[in-house]
Image: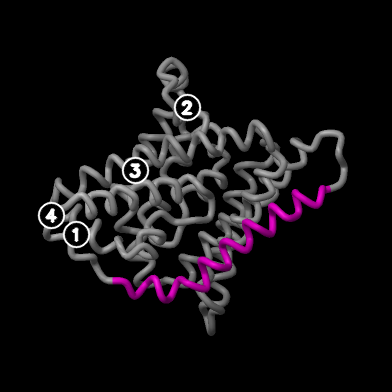
Amino acid sequence: MEYVKLFLKGIVVGVANVIPGVSGGTMAVVCNVYDKIIALISFNVKRIIESWKFWLPLALGMGFGIIAFSKIITVLLEKFPIPTVYFFEGLVAGSIPLIMRKEKNTRAKKPALLPVEIASFFLGLALMVAMFVFKDDSAKESAVALSQMSAGTIALVFVAGVAAAVAMIIPGISGSFLLLALGMYGTILAAVSSLNIPILAPFALGVMVGLFAGAAAVRLLMEKVPAYTYCLILGLVVGSLITIFPGIPTGVLIVVSILTFALGFAAAYLSSKGETE
């Protein structure tokens, strides 16, 4: 059953990664696999091999989710955008009690939140509010023309890959949204569809560097200041409810949206109930 649960969690994370604005990192937190994924993204080959029972069913689920469900989710977002997004809102909201339990466990004998922990929460929340404020301007970007590759354009694509990978690791921030903000989303999308290797190669290298560097930074924070880190993550996750908010539904959509939100909340809350590790 544990393999099945990991496979299903992988599907959720996989689907999230192909939806602009929805954070794969947030869905990893929702599914309570974020900490273990961060721990695995390293050069410790022995640890990776020994942990195959965790990452293999998760990776298979992610691949299956991207291939089998991305088109379904795309159709649902086109036909029923508000109820579908409310389902993701429910998933995110349902994960909040788990993050709060994790943060409380790191405080151990300290019953009250410290000012720095409160500040960490509001820092994460403020970052997401800022993302929301600038979202409309970023969505207007067009593909950057990179017809002539030079050292400068290669560096630009590489940096975009690093930034997108780090964003995928940070809960609440969508890698695809950050590419929009950098003005590179259309360029990378066009490069993928046309298999433009001169663009994809430095981008892929940047993604690899970003994944390892970002994961190392998060691991360090979780080891040195776990309570502050979880407060920051909590702020990012709560703030992501604002960034993906689809608006207030009207008519029959009110009932449908309430039901989809409740379904998402129950799925996240019940799947993580009692989990702290």
Q: What is the three-letter code of the residue carrying label 3?
A: Val
Q: Is 136 included in the stretch rendered in magenta? A: yes
Q: Which residue is mark 4?
A: 194
Q: Which residue is mark 2?
A: 54
Q: Which residue is mark 1?
A: 190
Of badges 3 and 4, nearer the viewer stands 3
Q: What is the three-letter code of the residue carrying label 2?
A: Phe
- Asked which secondary structure carries label 2, the reply is helix
Mark 3 to mark 4: distance in Å? 19 Å
Contact between labelled residues 4 and 1, with CB atoms less than 8 Å apart: yes
The residue lying at 32 percent from left, 65 percent from top is 183
Mark 2 to mark 1: distance in Å? 34 Å
Q: What is the three-letter code of the residue carrying label 4?
A: Ser
The crowding category of the residue bearing disc 3, from other C-alpha atoms within 10 Å (few below 14, some 14 to 19, many at least 20), is: many
Q: Which residue is mark 3?
A: 207
Of badges 2 and 1, nearer the viewer stands 1
Q: Left or right of 168: which side holds 252?
A: right
- Asked which secondary structure carries label 4, the reply is helix
Camera-nearest residue between 231 and 120? 120
Q: Left or right of 208: which side holds 192?
A: left
**3 or 2: tag closer to the N-terminus:** 2
The crowding category of the residue bearing disc 2, from other C-alpha atoms within 10 Å (few below 14, some 14 to 19, many at least 20), is: some
Per the rendered image, the range of residues in magenta is 113-141
The residue lying at 44 percent from left, 27 percent from top is 42
**1 or 3: tag closer to the N-terminus:** 1
Of badges 1 and 3, nearer the viewer stands 3
Mark 1 to mark 3: distance in Å? 17 Å
The residue lying at 61 percent from left, 53 percent from top is 266
